Amino acid sequence: MEKTILRNEVRETLAKMTATAYRDQSFLVAKKVLQEPYIIEAKTIGLTISNKPEVDTIHLIEALWQLGKKVAVPKCNPKTREMSFYVIESFAQLETVYMHLREPIPEVTEFVDANEIDIILVPGVVFDTHGYRVGYGGGYYDRYLVNYTKGKLMSLLFDEQLRASVPKAPHDCPVDIIVTPTKRINCVAQRGANKNG
């Protein structure tokens, strides 16, 4: 119940963001992400095609292509609630599916195994500084990340999506880094500080 309340509260706040603020703040986040050492070193980056009010990833994807990065985006299976990543080289390789989500067309894209992805940009609605998140309720990323052991997890969000704490379960996979228009949070260090004190 608490997750639903938090999710709705943050969504209402984000819905009030002006188009200009949305564009400018998304640009600031993307600019910071492109300077991240983990992104610079990565060959293959996993991320979703954003839907408002998420931080815009369209321009970020274009910038990653220009840097010669492989961009992998998820395809969800609503029956099993599982997802797979496929490398896209153009937005023409996407199709619009349920809930207005844009996903890769498997027939024209290359499947990529979890251990080939160097970093995954994990979406969500609400986050805390330890990297725990409240997602959209489908559980797709939670299922996928259980078997993702190779690389780093990063989340891009607006400052309005950050809270002191969020409800968490033992199986939740927290992210390593959070980037907002005004902050870069090392969630691993935050979790370590919490354990020590």
Image (cartoon, helix red, strand yellow):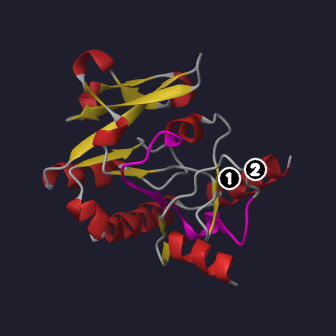
Residue type for callout 1:
Arg
Q: Quadrant of residue 158?
A: bottom right
Q: Residues within 10 Å of mark 2 (few under 14, many from 20)?
A: few
Q: Quadrant of residue 161?
A: bottom right
Dot 2 corresponds to which residue? 8
Real-space Cα separation, disc 1 to disc 2, in angstroms: 5 Å
Give the left or right position of residue 85, taking residue 157 as reference: left
Residue 58 located within the stretch drawn in magenta: no
Residue type for callout 2:
Asn
Dot 1 corresponds to which residue? 11
**Viewer-proximal residue among 11 and 81:** 81
Which x, y percent locates residue 8? 75, 50
Residue 161 located within the stretch drawn in magenta: yes
**Residue at 19%, 49% in the rendered image:** 69
**Viewer-proximal residue among 150 and 42:** 150
**Residue at 53%, 26% in the rendered image:** 82
**Residue 20: mark:** none
**Viewer-proximal residue among 64 and 153:** 153
Q: State the SS at label 2.
A: helix
From what the image shows, is residue 70 above or below residue 26? above
Q: Quadrant of residue 41?
A: bottom left
Which x, y percent locates residue 176? 48, 63
Which x, y percent locates residue 83? 48, 28
Please give the range of residues in magenta. Answer: 145-166
**Viewer-proximal residue among 81 and 15:** 81
Q: Residues within 10 Å of mark 1 (few under 14, many from 20)?
A: some
> Are the two marked residues, 1 and 2, in contact with CB atoms closer than 8 angstroms?
yes
Give the left or right position of residue 63, taking residue 136 as reference: left
Q: State the SS at label 1.
A: helix
**Residue at 70%, 84% in the rendered image:** 197
Which x, y percent locates residue 168? 73, 54
